[in-house]
Amino acid sequence: MDPLDNWITSDQACARLGIAWRTLYNHHRNTPDFPRPRHIGRTLLWPADKLDEWRTKHPPRKKRDDER
């Protein structure tokens, strides 16, 4: 088993969470319980299972159009 099997790229993390790239990095810097990435060279890899756990605890906000 490859030790990086459960790690995903930033693009994959954004798609998985349904957020923009900028939001991912804002969470990384400003949200204390947001999963920490691993640096492989200049690439950040994110733990897929931890991102899923975080999303379960923090559901996406509803858009204003959805509230009507």
Image (tube, rainbow, N blue to C red):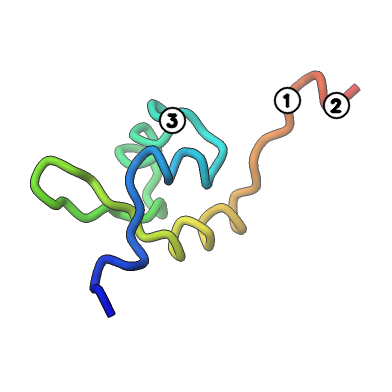
Q: Determine which of the numbered discs, if any, sits on residue 63 in the image.
A: 1
- Label 2 residue SS: helix
CB contact under 8 Å: marks 2 and 3: no
Quadrant, the C terminus: top right
Q: Amino acid at mark 2?
A: Glu
Kindly identify the amino acid type of the residue bearing the numbered disc 1: Lys
Q: Residue at x 47, y 28 (%)?
A: 20
Local SS, label 3 = helix
Looking at the image, tell me whether mark 3 or mark 1 is earlier in sequence order: 3
Tell me the crowding category of disc 1: few under 14, some 14 to 19, or many 20 or more residues within 10 angstroms, Cα based: few
Tell me which residue sits at (52%, 47%) in the image. 16
Q: Which residue is mark 3?
A: 23
* Furthest-front residue in this view: 1
Residue holding disc 2: 67
Kindly report the distance in space between the C-alpha atoms of the residues bearing marks 2 and 3. Answer: 22 Å
Callout 3–callout 1 Cβ contact below 8 Å: no
Side of 16 where 31 appears, left or right: left
Disc 2 vs disc 1: Cβ atoms closer than 8 Å?
Answer: yes
